C-alpha cells in the first residue's frame, strides 16, 4: 500500500518535472512565461480600457479591476485547457506501463494549482507595491473563488480529456462554444449592470459567479448578492465525477490509440 | 510467469474486425525466451502491448507474477522535447532507480556523445534505438518485451548490444516479436505461434518457425 502510494508519488513528480522542462519549449525564460503571459495580458487590457473609460466599474485602478476579473477566469480556463490535453501531450510516456492516464492528469493539475497560486500572489503583490495600495483583502472569498475555478476547470478538463479523444468534432464545437465565455463572464463589466432578464441568463455561466466572488475579496464594499456558491460547487463536482467515471471506463481506450 | 486467462482482444481496421486473440488461456513460463511468430497483421505487437499492460483486453485478464518491461521498439517511448538525458532521468524516476547511476550507465552505453544532451526530437532513428536499448538494459526486469528491434549501429556496437543482452538473459527472459528468423534463433529458445486468434506454444523455436513457414506456404497456395 505505502509502496504503491510512493510509486504514484514518484511518477507524478517525474511528470511534473518533465512538464516544467518542456511546457515552454526552448523559449528563453522557460517556465517564467507562465507568469509573463497573464501579466502582459492584464497590462494590455488595462491600457486599452483606461484609454476609453474614465474609471473602472469598481474602485479607481484599472489594473486591479482587470487583474481580479481576468485572473479568476484565467485560472478556470488554463486549468481546463491544460488538463484536457494531459494524455495527448504525454502519449509517448504512456508507453511505460507504470504511467497511467490518471497520473498525467494529476501531474498537470498539481503543477497548474501551484503555478496559478504563485502567479496570483506575484501579480497582486506587484499591483499592491507598484500601482495601487488596495485597502484590504479578505482571503475567504478569494480562496473560495480560487478553489471553485480550479475544481470547475479540473472537472471540465478531465471530462474533455476523454471526450476530445473520441470526437474531434466535439472538440471543435466545444472550442467555438466556449470562446465567448471570455466576454460573458463579467471580466470587463459587473453583472450588476446588466438588466433583467439578461442578467439571469448570464448567471447560468458558473464562471461569472467565480469572477464576482474573487472580486469581492478585493473590494470590501462590493456586495454581489447574486453569487450562488452551491450552484458552482455542484456543477464542478458533477464534472469531476463525470470525468473520473469516463476515465475509469475508457481510460484503457484513451491510452491505446 | 505471465498468464493469460480467457483473454479476447480485437481491433477494427478499415471497418473490419480483426481478432488478435479469442478466448485464449495461456501461460508463458519463466525461464524460456520466446519468439512471437505470426503473419503480418496477426496482432503480434498488440499482444505484446497486452502483456505489457498498455493495452487492455476486451475480455479476460492477464496475470503477471514477474516484473515486465515496457515494449521496447521502434515506436518511441521518448518525449521528443526532452533531451536524451532528461528522458533517462524520467525513466529512472518512474521505476524508482538511482537517476545518476542510470544516466551515467546509458550515457556510456549508447555512445551518443553530445547528442545525449540534445532533444530526442533531433535524433535519427538509429540514435533513438541506441538510447532505448541503453535505458532498458539499465533496468533489470524479469521479462523484456521486444518489438521488432533491428540491429542498431556499427558492428562494434552490435557486438556490445549482443553481449549485454546475453548477460541479461542469464537472469531474465524475453518475449520478442521479429520478422527475422535469424534474430529469433539468436535470442529465443521457444516459440509462440499466433494464428487466427489462437496461441500455440512450441518448446523449440525451430519447430515453431518451420510450422509457421509451412502455414504461410499453405495460405499462398489457396
Image: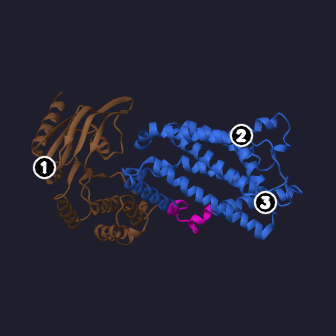
Chain colours: A blue, B brown
Q: Secondary structure at mark 1?
A: loop
Do tags 3 and 2 sit on the same chain?
yes
Magenta segment boundaries in residue numbering: A20-34
Q: Is residue A163 above or below residue A127?
A: above
Q: Is residue B157 visible?
A: yes
In the image, which disc is placed on residue A64? 3
Q: Residue at x 36, y 62 (%)?
A: B92
Kindly identify which chain the residue marked by label 3 belongs to: A
Q: Residue at x 75, y 56 (%)?
A: A68
- Per the model, the C-alpha gap separating discs 3 and 2 is 23 Å
**Mark 1 lies on residue:** B189
Give left or right: position of A133 versus A76. right
In the image, which disc is placed on residue B75? none
Return the residue nearer the eye: B89 or A6: A6
Do tags 3 and 1 sit on the same chain?
no
Q: Is residue B168 above or below residue A230?
A: below
Kindly identify which chain the residue marked by label 1 belongs to: B
A29 drawn magenta = yes
Q: Residue at x 25, y 47 (%)?
A: B65
**Mark 2 lies on residue:** A205
- Per the model, the C-alpha gap separating discs 3 and 1 is 72 Å
Q: Please state the horizontal and vertical placement of residue B165, each as a whole percent of the image.
A: 20, 60
Q: Is residue A176 visible?
A: no
Amino acid at each position: 500500500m505505502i509502496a504503491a502510494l510512493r510509486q504514484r508519488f514518484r511518477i507524478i513528480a517525474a511528470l511534473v518535472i518533465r512538464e516544467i522542462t518542456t511546457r515552454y519549449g526552448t523559449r528563453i525564460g522557460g517556465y517564467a512565461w507562465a507568469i509573463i503571459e497573464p501579466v502582459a495580458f492584464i497590462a494590455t487590457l488595462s491600457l486599452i480600457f483606461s484609454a476609453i473609460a474614465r474609471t473602472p466599474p469598481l474602485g479607481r485602478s484599472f489594473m486591479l479591476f482587470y487583474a481580479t476579473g481576468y485572473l479568476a477566469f484565467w485560472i478556470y480556463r488554463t486549468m481546463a485547457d491544460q488538463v484536457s490535453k494531459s494524455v495527448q501531450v504525454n502519449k509517448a510516456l504512456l508507453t511505460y506501463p507504470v504511467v497511467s492516464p490518471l497520473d498525467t492528469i494529476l501531474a498537470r493539475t498539481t503543477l497548474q494549482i501551484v503555478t496559478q497560486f504563485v502567479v496570483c500572489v506575484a501579480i497582486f503583490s506587484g499591483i499592491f507595491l507598484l500601482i495601487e495600495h488596495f485597502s484590504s483583502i479578505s482571503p475567504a472569498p478569494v480562496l473560495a473563488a480560487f478553489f471553485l475555478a480550479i475544481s470547475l476547470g479540473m472537472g471540465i478538463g478531465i471530462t474533455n480529456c476523454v471526450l476530445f479523444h473520441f470526437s474531434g468534432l466535439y472538440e471543435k464545437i466545444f472550442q467555438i462554444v466556449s470562446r465567448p465565455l471570455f466576454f460573458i463572464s463579467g471580466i470587463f463589466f459587473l453583472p450588476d449592470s446588466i438588466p433583467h432578464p439578461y442578467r439571469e441568463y448570464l448567471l447560468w455561466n458558473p464562471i461569472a459567479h467565480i469572477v464576482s466572488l474573487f472580486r469581492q475579496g478585493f473590494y470590501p464594499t462590493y456586495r454581489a448578492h447574486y453569487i450562488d456558491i452551491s450552484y458552482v460547487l455542484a456543477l464542478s463536482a458533477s464534472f469531476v465525477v463525470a470525468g473520473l467515471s469516463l476515465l475509469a471506463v475508457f481510460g484503457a481506450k484513451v491510452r491505446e490509440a | 510467469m505471465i498468464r493469460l486467462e480467457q483473454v479476447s482482444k480485437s481491433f477494427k481496421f478499415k471497418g473490419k474486425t480483426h481478432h488478435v486473440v479469442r478466448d485464449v488461456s495461456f501461460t508463458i513460463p519463466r525461464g524460456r525466451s520466446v519468439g512471437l511468430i505470426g503473419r503480418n497483421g496477426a496482432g503480434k505487437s498488440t499482444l505484446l502491448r497486452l502483456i505489457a499492460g498498455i493495452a487492455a483486453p476486451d475480455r479476460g485478464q492477464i496475470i503477471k507474477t514477474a516484473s515486465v518491461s515496457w515494449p521496447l521498439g521502434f515506436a518511441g517511448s521518448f518525449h521528443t522535447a526532452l533531451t536524451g538525458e532528461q528522458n533517462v532521468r524520467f525513466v529512472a524516476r518512474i521505476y524508482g532507480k538511482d537517476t545518476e547511476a542510470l544516466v551515467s550507465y546509458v550515457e556510456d552505453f549508447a555512445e551518443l556523445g553530445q547528442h545525449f544532451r540534445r532533444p530526442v526530437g533531433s535524433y535519427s532513428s538509429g540514435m533513438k534505438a541506441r538510447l532505448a536499448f541503453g535505458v532498458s538494459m539499465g533496468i533489470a526486469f524479469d521479462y523484456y518485451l521486444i518489438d521488432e528491434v533491428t540491429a542498431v549501429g556499427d558492428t562494434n556496437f552490435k557486438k556490445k548490444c549482443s553481449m549485454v543482452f546475453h548477460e541479461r538473459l542469464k537472469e531474465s527472459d524475453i518475449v520478442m516479436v521479429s520478422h527475422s528468423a535469424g534474430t529469433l534463433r539468436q535470442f529465443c529458445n521457444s516459440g509462440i505461434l499466433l494464428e487466427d486468434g489462437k496461441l500455440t506454444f512450441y518448446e523449440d523455436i525451430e519447430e515453431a518457425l518451420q510450422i509457421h513457414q509451412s502455414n504461410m506456404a499453405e495460405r499462398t497456395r489457396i
